[in-house]
């Protein structure tokens, strides 16, 4: 499909630079079938049904942004994907100053050798020493905020907490599964009291999630690969929920992409462990999920294509136009949307 079909104009002042506080006070645009409602994230128990289940990503963001030098040249590196015990694929800033075999010193006694330059300009970084790379990053790295935030303000101590979800446990992501930033222990308790369960899976989000789609046609875009895991107990619980008539609601596009990678044509979710590069565009038949809670996405992005596949392109363009007019906050630290493609007249949401 033509990528320009997924373009829209977003005023710069709609890009959130800090999250809402408390987290569940963020606004939430609910699209339920053909209906649109303006709600808050804390209203979620009233927007779902007993027997539904939410699926969260428990990946934990590592301080994957590094600043270093090769000789006199300043080099920036954003780790993207683990390739080995001491090797990470990384996107390099000032890459024209780096050649295969060069040693980059990142300070704090942390250094790596660059090799295997990719077609996307990335390098494989092999870190020196015997310490786990995660310890090296704690010493030399900073939180890798999205470029649309980092370009407007420096990373600070608040981001170390703000850019992690309450479910963060498995270290390995270089970007947060931001839809889950809206959840608090109190909200989870109220969801459970309403008969709405939750499970977690792991997808280590890579920096490729921020790469623009440069192709004019979506068929020519090469999707980045990310590692994920769904264990057997989680797959069984999700299948049992569906068999009992409940809905599977993915919290975030990362959880959705992994669930869809693990589901078969009969809508059965299987245990999964490995890489996925699934690219969801309009025309895709969803096999695993019945709804999605997500933030507002970049124009012309793979994620806006994904939500358009779920709800329809024109529906999403109109929803984003509404969100812009109503002063919703966009992107990673912004507000949420709840996308329920099949409205249920028996449980239709009343306006807030």
Image (tube, rainbow, N blue to C red):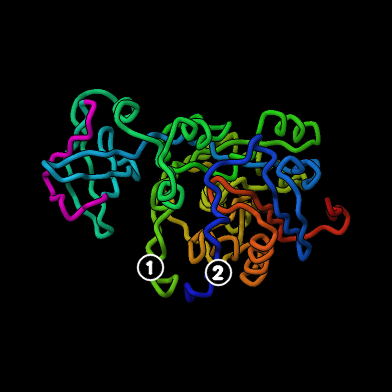
Magenta-tinted stretch: 93-108
Q: Quadrant of residue 305?
A: bottom right
Side of 165 relative to 175 (left or right): right
Front position in the image: 282 or 24? 24
Residue drawn 67% across the image and 28% down it: 185
Q: Residue 283: name its quadrant.
A: bottom right
Residue underneath mark 2: 8
Location of residue 127 in the rendering, given as x and y in whole percent from the top left corner: 21, 34
Position of 70 relative to 290 (above/below): above
Specify whether residue 235 is in view: no
Front residue of 213/257: it is 213
Which callout, 2 or 1, points at the residue further toward the start of the chain?
2
Decide if residue 117 is in sight here: yes
Q: Is residue 197 above or below residue 2?
A: above
Residue at x 73% of width, y 40% of height: 42
- The answer for how far apart the CA atoms under marks 2 and 1 are is 16 Å
Q: Which residue is mark 1?
A: 214
């Amino acid at each position: 499909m033509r990528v320009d079909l997924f373009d829209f104009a977003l005023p710069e002042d709609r890009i959130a630079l800090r999250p809402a506080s408390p987290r569940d006070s963020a606004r939430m645009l609910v699209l339920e079938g053909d209906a649109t409602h303006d709600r808050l994230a804390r209203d979620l128990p009233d927007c779902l049904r007993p027997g539904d289940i939410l699926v969260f990503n428990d990946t934990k963001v590592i301080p994957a942004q590094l600043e270093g030098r090769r000789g006199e040249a300043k080099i920036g590196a954003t780790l993207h994907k683990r390739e080995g015990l001491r090797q990470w694929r990384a996107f390099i800033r000032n890459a024209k100053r780096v050649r295969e075999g060069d040693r980059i010193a990142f300070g704090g006694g942390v250094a790596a050798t660059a090799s295997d330059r990719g077609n996307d300009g990335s390098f494989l970084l092999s870190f020196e020493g015997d310490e786990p790379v995660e310890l090296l990053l704690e010493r030399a790295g900073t939180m890798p905020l999205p470029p649309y935030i980092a370009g407007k303000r420096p990373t600070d101590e608040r981001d170390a907490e703000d850019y992690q979800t309450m479910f963060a446990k498995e270290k390995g992501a270089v970007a947060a599964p931001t839809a889950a930033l809206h959840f608090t222990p109190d909200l989870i308790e109220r969801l459970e009291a309403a008969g709405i369960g939750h499970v977690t899976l792991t997808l280590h989000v890579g920096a490729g999630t921020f790469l623009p789609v440069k192709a004019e046609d979506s068929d020519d875009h090469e999707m980045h690969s990310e590692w994920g895991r769904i264990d057997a107990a989680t797959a069984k619980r999700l299948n049992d929920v569906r068999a009992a008539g409940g809905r599977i609601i993915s919290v975030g596009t990362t959880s959705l992409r992994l669930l869809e990678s693990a589901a078969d044509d009969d809508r059965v979710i299987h245990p999964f462990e490995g890489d996925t590069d699934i690219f969801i565009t309009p025309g895709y038949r969803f096999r695993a999920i019945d709804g999605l809670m997500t933030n507002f996405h970049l124009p012309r992005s793979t994620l806006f294509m994904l939500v358009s596949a779920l709800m329809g392109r024109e529906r999403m363009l109109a929803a984003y136009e509404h969100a812009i007019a109503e002063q919703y906050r966009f992107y990673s630290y912004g507000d949420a949307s709840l996308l329920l493609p099949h409205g249920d007249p028996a449980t239709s949401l009343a306006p807030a």
